[in-house]
Image (cartoon, grey):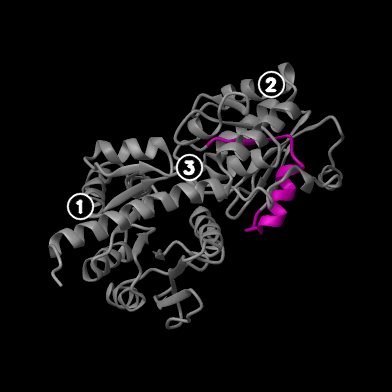
C-alpha cells in the first residue's frame, strides 16, 4: 500500500501535526509492502526520498510556515506518485488538492481534522465568523471518504455541523523519547529552588487560547513553596516572582528532560483538540492538572491527575493543593506513565490508523470492480 500525506502544517518549529506525521511515516515504512510519501510546502521543487517539497511562499512572522496558494502543483505531484490512499492534514489549499487528485486517481482520500478551524478563526476575528467557517468546513470535509478526528470532543463537534463519516483516531507518544529516565537532578539548582518546592511546568506556544494569564494568577495565589516553569515561544515577560520563563522553541530532548524533572504539568487551555503535551508529561512520569475542557477531559483520566474548572485559577490552586496534600504525586505520575503505555504507544495508534486505510482501500477496489462488471475470457 502506498500512502501519501499532504499538509501545510509542517515547519521547523511545528507542533503536533509534524510529530504525528514523523512518527507515522517512521513506523509505516517498516511494514512490508508499505510505501509512504509526504508532501509539504517548501522553497524547492520535489526532492524525492519520500519527502516532496511543493514550492509555496513563506508566511510572514510564522517561524518557517509556508502557505500554498495554488492547488495545481500539489495535484500534479500526487498524480505522479499515484498512491493508493491520500491523507490531507489541513483544511486549506492542500485539502482541496488532495480531493482533486483522489478523483483523478480514483483512490480514497482521508481528511484528518487536526485543528478546530471555526474556533481558531473566531479567536482572531471575533464571534460571528464561526458560522461562516463551519459552513466552509462542512463543504470541504463532506467530500472526504473518511474524516479522522483526534478526540471525541472534536468528532462530536464535526457531527454537530452535519458531517457523518467521522471516526476518532487518537494520537500517540514516543515512549522512548518521553521517559522518566530523563530526569535532570540539576534543574532545581539552576532555577534556585530547594528540594521542598513543588515544580510545576507548562510547555507550548504562548498563544491566547493557552490562557497563560490563568497560570500566572494560579502561581501568584500558590505563592511560596510552588514554582512554575513556562517553556516555549511567545511566553509572557511580566511574571510573578515564583515563575521562570524559557522563551524559545526547544527540541524534544530538552522538553522531555524538563518534564521528567518537574512535579506536575499544569494546563489552563480550554480549546485543545488533543493536548499532546499532557500525554508527553504523563509518559515522563508526572501527573497533570488541567482545565476540564476540550480534549484534556479525555486525556487526563482519573488516577493520572486532576481537572479544574475552566478559566478558574482558584480552582486550579485547589487541584494543585489536592494533588500534593492528599495524594502521593509520584505514584500518580507512575500510573500516568502506565496509562500512556497502554493506550497511546505510537505502535498501537498506527495499527489503528492502518486498519482505516486497509478498509478504505479494499472498499475502493471492490467498488471499482463492481462498476467494471464481470470479466470474460
Vertical relation: 196 (above or below) 258: above
Q: Is residue 250 magenta?
A: yes
Vertical relation: 80 (above or below) 23: below
Determine whether, in the image, residue 249 is placed left or right of residue 153: right
At which x and y percent is residue 199?
75, 36
Residue at the spot of label 1: 139
Vertical relation: 150 (above or below) 57: above
Mark nearer the N terminus (1 vs 3): 1
Q: CA distance from mark 2 to mark 1?
A: 47 Å
Quarter in which the N terminus is drawn: bottom left
The outermost residue toward the front is 377
Quarter in which the C terminus is drawn: bottom left
- Residue at horizontal 47 percent and vertical 80 percent from the top: 48
Residue at the spot of label 3: 274
Residue at the spot of label 2: 321
At which x and y percent is residue 98?
30, 65
Mark nearer the N terminus (2 vs 1): 1
Region of the chain picked out in magenta, as a range = 247-268
- Residue at horizontal 27 percent and vertical 76 percent from the top: 72
Vertical relation: 329 (above or below) 183: above
Q: 310 or 264, which lies in front?
A: 264
Q: 377 or 228, which lies in front?
A: 377
Determine whether, in the image, residue 107 is placed left or right of residue 178: left
Determine whether, in the image, residue 272 is placed left or right of residue 129: right
Q: Is residue 73 magenta?
A: no
Amino acid at each position: 500500500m502506498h500512502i501519501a500525506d499532504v499538509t501545510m502544517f509542517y515547519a521547523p518549529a511545528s507542533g503536533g501535526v509534524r510529530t504525528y506525521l514523523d512518527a507515522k511515516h517512521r513506523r509505516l515504512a517498516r511494514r512490508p509492502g508499505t510505501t509512504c510519501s509526504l508532501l509539504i510546502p517548501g522553497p524547492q521543487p520535489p526532492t524525492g526520498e519520500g519527502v516532496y517539497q511543493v514550492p509555496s511562499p513563506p508566511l510572514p512572522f510564522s517561524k518557517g510556515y509556508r502557505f500554498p496558494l495554488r492547488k495545481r502543483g500539489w495535484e500534479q505531484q500526487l498524480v505522479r506518485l499515484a498512491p493508493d490512499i491520500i491523507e490531507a492534514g489541513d483544511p486549506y489549499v492542500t485539502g482541496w488538492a488532495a480531493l482533486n487528485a483522489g478523483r483523478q486517481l480514483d483512490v480514497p482520500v482521508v481528511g484528518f481534522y487536526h485543528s478546530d478551524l471555526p474556533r481558531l478563526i473566531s479567536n482572531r476575528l471575533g464571534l460571528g465568523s464561526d458560522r461562516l467557517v463551519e459552513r466552509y468546513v462542512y463543504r470541504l470535509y463532506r467530500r472526504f471518504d473518511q474524516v479522522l478526528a483526534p478526540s471525541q470532543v472534536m468528532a462530536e463537534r464535526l457531527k454537530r455541523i452535519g458531517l457523518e463519516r467521522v471516526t476518532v483516531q487518537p494520537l500517540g507518544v514516543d515512549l522512548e523519547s518521553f521517559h522518566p529516565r530523563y530526569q535532570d537532578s540539576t534543574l532545581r539548582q539552576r532555577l534556585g529552588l530547594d528540594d521542598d518546592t513543588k515544580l510545576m511546568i507548562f510547555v507550548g506556544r504562548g498563544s491566547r487560547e493557552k490562557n497563560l494569564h490563568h497560570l500566572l494568577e494560579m502561581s501568584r495565589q500558590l505563592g511560596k513553596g510552588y514554582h512554575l516553569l513556562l517553556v516555549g515561544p511567545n511566553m509572557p515577560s511580566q511574571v510573578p516572582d515564583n515563575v521562570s520563563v524559557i522563551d524559545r522553541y526547544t527540541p524534544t530532548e530538552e522538553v522531555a528532560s524538563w518534564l521528567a524533572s518537574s512535579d506536575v504539568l499544569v494546563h489552563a487551555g480550554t480549546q485543545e483538540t488533543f493536548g499532546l503535551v499532557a500525554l508527553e508529561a504523563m509518559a515522563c512520569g508526572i501527573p497533570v492538572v488541567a482545565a476540564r475542557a476540550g480534549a484534556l477531559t479525555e486525556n487526563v483520566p482519573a488516577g493520572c491527575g486532576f481537572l479544574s474548572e475552566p478559566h478558574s485559577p482558584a480552582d486550579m490552586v485547589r487541584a494543585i493543593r489536592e494533588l500534593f496534600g492528599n495524594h502521593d504525586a509520584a505514584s500518580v505520575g507512575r500510573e500516568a506513565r502506565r496509562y500512556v503505555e497502554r493506550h497511546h504507544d505510537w505502535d498501537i495508534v498506527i495499527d489503528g490508523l492502518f486498519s482505516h486505510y486497509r478498509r478504505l482501500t479494499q472498499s475502493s477496489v471492490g467498488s471499482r470492480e463492481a462498476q467494471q462488471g464481470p470479466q470474460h475470457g
